[in-house]
Image (cartoon, grey):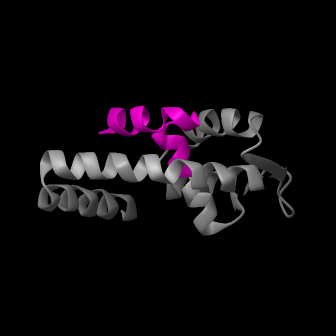
Amino acid sequence: MTATYDEALKPVDLRITQFSVLRTLSRLGPVSVTRLAAETALDRSTMGRNLDPLERRGLVRLDVGETDQRERIVHLTEIGTSAIEKALPYWREAQAQLSEAMGPAAFDTIAENLTALQRT
């Protein structure tokens, strides 16, 4: 499934994990790297590897935490918001392809199970 999304998002130069990070930031607003990792079901070091290219491209900005100088707060930039908007049609197309390939019921079940796993 990941390969399908990665291929679909190539025109906007994003991988599905990066797109997920951007969408999560869009939903949550500025958040610590640790919380962002938890929300996207990635470990903190993997999150760091995903944030590096996003920061270089100006899609996110990292600031020092106000109460803890060791903490890093991730912000979605305007460029990041624009990248989400550009990527959404490609992501939706991948969703449709996968749903068609496995059947809508199976696709919905997988999506529900992944959501449930993320909550644990």
Question: Residue 3: image x %, image y %?
Answer: 35, 32
Judge left or right: residue 86 versus residue 59: left
**Relative to 40, is 119 above or below?**
below
Judge left or right: residue 105 versus residue 41: left
Question: Residue 61: image x %, image y %?
Answer: 79, 48
Magenta: main secondary structure equals helix
The question of residue 4 being in magenta is answered with: yes
Question: Residue 37: image x %, image y %?
Answer: 56, 50
Whether residue 10 can be seen here: yes
Judge left or right: residue 31 versus residue 65: left
Q: Nearer the viewer, residue 117 or 50?
A: 50
**Relative to 45, is 21 above or below?**
below
Judge left or right: residue 24 versus residue 79: left
Question: Residue 114: image x %, image y %?
Answer: 30, 56
Q: Nearer the viewer, residue 55 or 96?
A: 96
**Relative to 89, is 105 above or below?**
below
Q: Residue 2's quadrant in the figure?
A: top left
Residue plotted at (59% across, 55% down): 85
The question of residue 25 being in magenta is answered with: no
Residue plotted at (69% across, 34% down): 52
Given the current orientation, which residue lies at the most extreme bottom position?
28
Whether residue 77 can be seen here: no
Please report the bounds of the magenta region as a residue range: 1-22
Residue plotted at (52% across, 55% down): 38
Q: Residue 30's quadrant in the figure?
A: bottom right
Q: Quadrant of the C terminus?
A: bottom left
Q: Quadrant of the N terminus?
A: top left
**Relative to 27, is 2 above or below?**
above
